[in-house]
Image: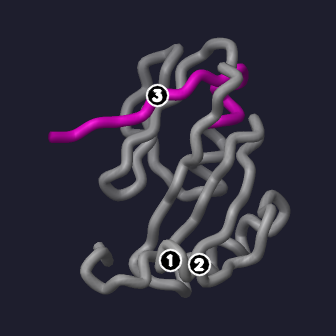
Amino acid sequence: MSGLVFLKTENLDLMREFYINRIGMELWCDQGQCIILRHGNFLLGFCEGTIEPVSPCITFFYSKKTDVDKMHDVLQDISTSDPVENVKFNIYHFWAKDPENRTLEFQHFNDPSLIV
């Protein structure tokens, strides 16, 4: 089974530029009013429309802590926290915001069985 998450955006071009150039996703499918981006096996779609008041957390996970640190270096200007160990969830992560104020999380699972 495969799937993807679609979110509405008020600025499709800005989301395309941000998620491709800042986050490192690639354009998987361009449908005109909607785009689908890919990061590994994660598909994320944006469609033109009014942003809904409930906003999800978009989480990107990495196989190494150093990759989380690298993303924090790249995204310091939008980061809302420094990378930290989260003992409760056994992860290493930090938070940021995208241009439309969605919550982004960049994390590493400390449990070796979850590393992909």
Q: Give the labeled residue for mark 2.
A: 86
Q: Give the labeled residue for mark 1.
A: 91
Does residue 97 show up magenta in the picture? no
First in residue order: circle 1 vs circle 2: 2
Estimate the spatial distance between the alpha carbons at disc 1 and disc 2, rounded to whole Å. 5 Å
Residue type indicated by callout 3? Phe
Residue 43: percent from the left, percent from the top? 38, 42
Foreground of the two, 20 or 47: 47
Foreground of the two, 19 or 86: 86
Quadrant in the picture for the N terminus: top left
Disc 2 crowd rating (10 Å Cα; few below 14, some 14-19, many 20+) is some
Residue 60: percent from the left, percent from the top? 49, 59
Q: Are marks 1 and 2 in contact (CB under 8 Å)?
A: yes
In the rendered view, tell whether residue 52 sits above or below residue 15.
above
Q: Is residue 64 left or right of residue 102?
A: left
- Specify the segment rendered in magenta: 1-15
Residue 86: percent from the left, percent from the top? 59, 78
Task: Give the foreground label among 1 and 3.
Answer: 1
Element under disc 2: strand
Does residue 4 show up magenta in the picture? yes
Residue type indicated by callout 1? Ile
In the rendered view, tell whether residue 85 sits above or below residue 95.
below
Task: Give the foreground label among 2 and 3.
Answer: 2
Q: Residue furthest right?
A: 77
Please give the name of the residue rendered at 42% of the width and 84% of the height, measured from the top-left corner.
110
Q: Are marks 2 and 3 in contact (CB under 8 Å)?
A: no
Q: Is residue 87 left or right of residue 54?
A: left
Q: Residue furthest left?
A: 1
Please give the name of the residue rendered at 42% of the width and 19% of the height, measured from the top-left corner.
31
Foreground of the two, 44 or 34: 44
Q: Which numbered dot is residue 106?
A: none
Element under disc 3: strand
